[in-house]
Amino acid sequence: MTIFRQREKELPMRTEKLVKAAVAGAAILILSQTVLAQAVTLRYKPLAGQRRFYERSVRTEVITSANNHVQRRVTEVPVLGRALAVETKADPPSMRLVVVDTPQGGRVLLYEEDGKDRLSAIPEASRQWMLPPVLFAQWRDLRGQPTEKPPNPTEPGQALDMIQAQMRFLPEQAVKPGDTWTRDIDLGAAKGSITTKYVANRTEGTTPCAILESSANVTFTGGPTERLKVERLTSRMAMALDGSGYVNQGGSFTLVEKADNSEQRVMRDFQEKTTDADQLQSAELDKARKDLAQIEKGLKEAQAGDIDTAIETLGAFVRENPQGAWTASVQALTTSLSNQRLLTKPVAAPRLRSMLRDLQAAHDRAGNQGNTPQLEQINQALRQIVTVNLKTIMEDSKDPDPVVRDLASFALAFAQGDEPAKRLLEMVKDENVEVRGSALISLAIQGRALDQKPLLALLQDSEPRVRGAAALVASRTMQRNDPRVAEVLPLLSENLKLTSPWTRMNTVSAVGALAPLGSVPVARALIDAYKAEKDERLKPHYLSVLKVLTGAEGNDAGPYEEWLKHPTTPPPPAPPAPKPETPPAPKPETPPAPKPETPPAPKPETPPAPKPETPPAPKPETPPAPKSETPPAPKPKG
């Protein structure tokens, strides 16, 4: 009975709330009808301490066409964000916003080759990737425009982001539904004309809003003019008529790049909506201002070149605010500065060796997983570290300890110049099998050929690992029509019988890259090796190479054995599609440094990132050459 009585008491209260809601709805309708009839000046009306939370989804579709082959990839990056007005000014009217975007990880939704679903061919580890949080602070006027002009973009993707941001600036003059206005912009790398229309007044949820829709015509200047075209660039925003901010916004663009017989079409769409808003108390706002001052101090120290002091300043912020809203982004910046310090100053030999061992392990792991974006980042870091510490690495390459020499031979793969290359050629003769193998892999990474006599000797080395590394060098430095291949192929065919899976995999790849198309002896050797293969993971590699060499196709040896009865020469395999030159995408593992005083234009439609947002998909139609710059397997002892 108590529960029923309580509900009876609540009923009048609920009725009263419903009446108030109805009255409020009528007031909103009257307000909308009133505003509809007159021009209004749309402006933000922020209060210091006002905080807004939002969700954003960025979806990117890339279609690449080349040599009658089509690849299609679709990726998505969800983002959670918050924006805080830490300060406002009356003269000139402006607000200082601190924005934090926290990507929730990107993922591949779809991958197709020539209309066939190939998503399962992408390793699971490559279908998802992490992106760092990003923080920036900025003064904006009440139209949402930065009060300080950001630097002009240097890349077409950046230019599109900046133009799309400008499409959401509120109009200077009073406007009413049905009004249209146009403005021209010049960003150096691109020029555009933006047309915006005040479409209507509409209630979004319970908020009366002005619906603004924009489109832009964009042309690029300089080199990209001939090959890049923006087919579509649009934006839409629902701006609260009371000036409290936008309720939702979205936009899309289509960028087309053409080169010779290939074309890449990048279509990106973003949708963002406000999910909540609140007001900080006075003490919380004071704390936010103090924290921002500390972050800015660290940034100024970094910009002045005092990286050690900047790291200490920002590290102190992280220690004082372990659970703060800005902590993750400041931690990412601190890590970036720490890496920058390591990449720009020589370090002592013990520390250098520790760094190289960690990077070598990460390099092998990314190669094994097929995680190309991460592998590219690791390679970039290795190139910088090796360049700065080359003298120490060259000394280590002659160290009495074979473990130290082996690590040095790995590092020299990322060195430039004749001396490192000369040293690697010497190291392939090292008495230690690990050193010989690592030196050969480094030569393969650099694409440096061996003379025929030492190559043939290494293909007959007493250690299977060395033979596999020599096969890798051959596949990377020879062509199918190279006359030297005639001496190499019999040794490769013999090495298909070795017990090391890593060696067999590299050997199969080399055979596929070098053997003459339609070669009966090579096809017979591959079929025999396939039938004897006990590692199920390698069997698809044999079949894909047999398909290239014979033109037949099958899920087992049967069709290829039939081909042996009536061999024919298949047409040459299609070359791989060219790599896109200008996908407007991010580099996820290295966060850009936030710039509170003069940040780049905000990019609500895309998290700073990755190239990536899409790892390159495997190509099962071609022989499975080792992925990226490392064989996709750990280094077996033999």
Image: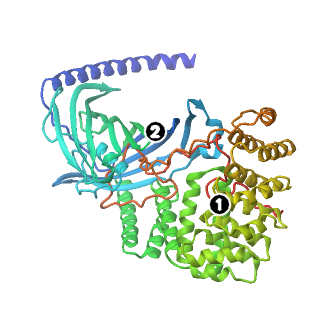
Tell me: 610 left or right of 218. right
Compared to residue 10, the image places residue 214 above or below, namely below
Q: Using a 10 Å C-alpha cutoff, classify the residue at mark 2 as few (fewer than 14 neighbours), some (14 to 19) or many (20 or more).
A: many
Task: Give the position of the N terminus as an image quadrant.
Answer: top right
Residue where numbered disc 2 is placed = 60
| Mark identifier at residue 444 | none
Report which quarter residue 119 is drawn in: top right
Give, as a three-letter code, the residue at label 2: Thr
Give, as a three-letter code, the residue at label 1: Ala
Residue located 57% across and 35% down the image: 113
Place of residue 398 in the rendered image (x, y in percent of width and height, measured from the top left): 69, 82
Q: Is residue 355 visible?
A: no
Residue where numbered disc 1 is placed = 362
Closer to the camera in the image, 601 or 85 = 601
Compared to residue 492, the image places residue 184 above or below, namely above
Place of residue 311 in the rendered image (x, y in percent of width and height, measured from the top left): 47, 70
Closer to the camera in the image, 216 or 576 = 576
Task: Give the position of the C terminus as an image quadrant.
Answer: bottom right
- Disc on the earlier residue, 1 or 2: 2
Tally the marks: 2
Closer to the camera in the image, 75 or 522 = 522
Place of residue 636 in the rendered image (x, y in percent of width and height, measured from the top left): 80, 61
